[in-house]
């Protein structure tokens, strides 16, 4: 996944070839609305983590908990 990452205009950091050789890639990006960031990160599952700012991280955790609770029983609502 690291090798396939394509930088976006919102990215503040520049990804180098050395970065792509590591096992983790830290991307710093300016986000105007956490809603869109959460939607972008969710498909990556355990392979992507929001680490900062804490408010956005907690909002993401809350969203994951809501989704998890929807599927806990294994029955449709």
Image (cartoon, grey):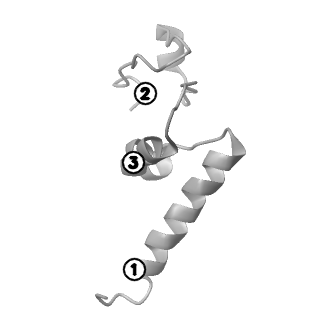
User: Which residue bears the numbered disc 3?
Assistant: 39
Mark 1 and mark 2 in contact? Answer it, CB < 8 Å: no
Q: Callout 2: few (<14), some (14-19), or many (20+) C-alpha neighbours within 10 Å?
A: some
In this view, 6 is above or below 69: above
Left or right: where does residue 7 sit relative to residue 65? left
Q: Is residue 18 above or below residue 30?
A: above
Q: Residues within 10 Å of mark 1 (few under 14, many from 20)?
A: few
Q: Who comes first in sequence, dot 2 or dot 3?
A: 2
Q: Label 3's element?
A: helix
Q: Residue furthest front?
A: 32
Residue 42 coordinates in the image, percent (x, y): 41, 51
Q: Which residue is mark 1?
A: 71
Answer with mark 1 or mark 3, whichever residue precedes in sequence.
Answer: 3
Q: Tell me where residue 23 appears, x and y as whole percent.
A: 54, 30
Q: Residue at x 50, y 9 (%)?
A: 16
Q: Is residue 69 above or below residue 44?
A: below
In which image quadrant can residue 52 be found?
top right
Q: Position of residue 35 (x, y in %)?
A: 45, 47
């Amino acid at each position: 996944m690291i090798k396939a990452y394509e930088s976006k205009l919102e990215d503040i950091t520049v990804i180098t070839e050395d970065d792509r050789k590591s096992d983790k890639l830290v991307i710093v990006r300016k986000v105007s609305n956490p809603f869109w960031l959460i939607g972008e990160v969710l498909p990556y599952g355990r392979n992507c983590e929001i680490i900062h700012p804490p408010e956005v991280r907690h909002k993401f955790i809350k969203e994951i908990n809501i989704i998890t609770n929807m599927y806990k029983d294994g029955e449709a609502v």
